[in-house]
Structures are given as C-alpha cells and as structure tokens.
Image (cartoon, rainbow, N blue to C red):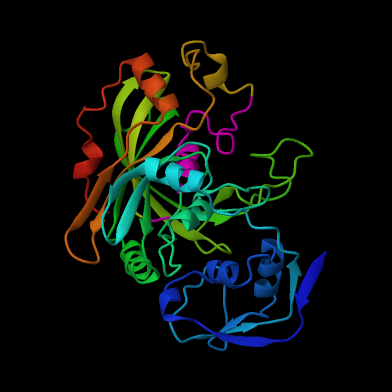
Amino acid sequence: MSGAADKVAQLEVGEDEAGMRLDRWFKRHFPTLPLSHLNKIVRKGEVRVAGRRAETSTRLEAGQSVRVPPLHLAAPKPARPASADDATAIRAMILYEDRGVIVLNKPYGLAVQGGSGTTRHIDGMLAALADRQGERPVLVHRLDRDTSGVLLVAKSRGIAADLGEIFRSRGAKKFYWALVEGVPKPARGRISLFLAKGEAMGDARTLRKGARGDFERMRIVEHGDKDAQHSITLYAVIDKVAPRLAWLSMRPITGRTHQLRAHCEAIGHPIVGDPKYNRRPANDPARKDPLRALPPGLEPKLHLLARRLILPHPKGGVIDVTAPLPPHMQKSFEMFGFDVTTYDPIEDAPDE
C-alpha cells in the first residue's frame, strides 16, 4: 500500500538542520519517500528552496522555506525496535567517548543507515543509547556497508551540526588504508577527477551486454557535465608485493560518494574485493598474467579501512582516533608481512 501527501506544503528548515543536504532533509521528514520519486520532483523543479530550484545535493540553511509538492509515499515498514543487544553491540564498537561524541569502529558488512532490504544498521541501533529525555546519538558522516573503521557520532543534534560544519569546511582529516591490485606509479600522487552518480545504461566501457546501469555507481565525467562534482584524493604507497598488489594510504580532500573506490579504479588499481569498482574484463592482462594475478587465500571482501580521523572538538581540544584492521585485512596483512607500525607518508602530505 502507499499513501500520499496531497497538498503543497512550505516547511521551514530547523536550526539543527543547517548544512544538511536536501535529500537527507527529505529522508528525515518523509522516511518512506522513494529516492526515485524525490529525484523526479527535484528534476522537474517542483521542490523549491527559498523560492528557487534546487538539487538533491543543495545544502540548506536554518530558516529557509522548502516547498514540498504532493508526495507519493510508500507505506511505512514496521520499525525494528532498539534492544539491549543493540546497546551492547554499539558499546563494543566504541573506540573513544566523551560527553559530546562517540567514535565507533564500524565492522565490515554492517550498514550505517537503512535502505532497501536493510533492517539492521548503525543508525537504528543508536536508538538503544537514547537518554532519559529521548535524545539519541546522531550520525555525523557515513561509511559504505563494506568499509570498516572510524565512524563519528554526536550525542546531540547541536554537536552534530557543529561537527557537520567542520566536515564541510574541510577541517577534518580522514586517512584510509586499502589493498589495491597492482602498484600505482608514482608511489605518491594526487587524483583529481570529476564524478557523477549513476552509471549510464549500455555504457560499453563498464557494462556487460544487456546489463542495467547502476544508479549508485559513480562514473568519471568532464568538468561542466551535468551533476559533475570535483573530487580530490591524495595517496601514497606504504608497502607492496610487486607487481601484484600494494598497501595504499589515502586522504580524501573532498567527500564524494564512493570517492576512494572510484578513484582507485580510475587509475587502474581497483581495491581488492570491491564488487562495484573492480570490473576488469577476463582478457585484461592483469588477470591473465600469472605474475600479476592476486595471490590465493585473499578473502573476497572489500579491503578498505577508515584508519584515522583527526578534527577539532566543538567543545575544545582535538579528536584523534585510529581504528584497527578488520579481521579479513589483518589476515591479508599477515599473509604479506605488512607491518602496521610502518611510517605512513600520507600523514605529512599537504592539505591539497
């Protein structure tokens, strides 16, 4: 069954929603609104922010008016109630906690937010940590389901808004580790590309004949193309098993969807175990050459870790937290003799 909001409404952006993306704002106010329908009404100009056309990526300001047209809403699914098990699981993930923030070590395979067919996720589990007034911790950023590591959570919406502004102003430094196929040259570099969401139907470069486009997959586009977003990543090779694979440290300067995964594929060195951005055809030399083939024994899981996060604390001081390797990456590091105490050159890289 589905319902509909059959009247045009003008809703005001709250103070705790300042800086929020328009699509996230709709997700908060209309959680059962299908993304496809939101994209359609935004594209047609039916959604207006402060009287002007907007994009789903538009950042909102407190006090702005959002024009919401009649909506076709899916019937709400029964919410999975928070439980004592959720609280125990979340507390087991905590790397750091103070009066304002929690930093979690997100495990591989656990979604940060809900989606189609997803019933268990960090956002839902955080409800189990709500205080006596009913205020619950709030996600500040997100990681892909199969990316492990540092995830920042605020204990109030006010702190979340402050931290969100720090992220938007590039005041947070994020460091990632990955195992990638092959060895990038040069050993240190800067990847600067324009990305857009949504794989084109029938793109012969990336799709098998008859396959459907992947709306969630980012593609490389040109400056000036529709929906093009500039993306920058700094990278450095820490160690390698030449010519098969390398241990890469990366620092994203921008924060685009799937940025690191798309960037690694774009430079010809996809992340080991990436099902979405590792589509080398069977006749690719890297797959046929036994000297360059990946060693047996690697688990077919995404080898990407949000290793470290550094940013100023809204209440003073600095948050600086490091996550350990997830079990599948620990196994791979031991296989190749990689030492996690090795100097990481990306830590001294310039901001741009």
- In the depicted view, which residue is nearer to us: 344 or 166? 166
Residue pushed farthest right? 1
Image coords of residue 328 (percent x, y): 44, 25
Q: Is residue 256 visible?
A: no
Residue pushed farthest left? 317
Residue 195 belongs to magenta span: no
Q: Is residue 12 above or below residue 91?
A: below
Main secondary structure found in the magenta portion: loop
Q: Is residue 349 above or below residue 339?
A: below
Image coords of residue 237 (percent x, y): 30, 31
Q: Is residue 157 above or below residue 129?
A: below
Relative placement, left or right, of 102 versus 218 is: left
Total numbered circles: 0
Residue 163 sits in quarter: bottom left
Residue stretch in magenta:
254-281
Q: Is residue 73 visible?
A: yes
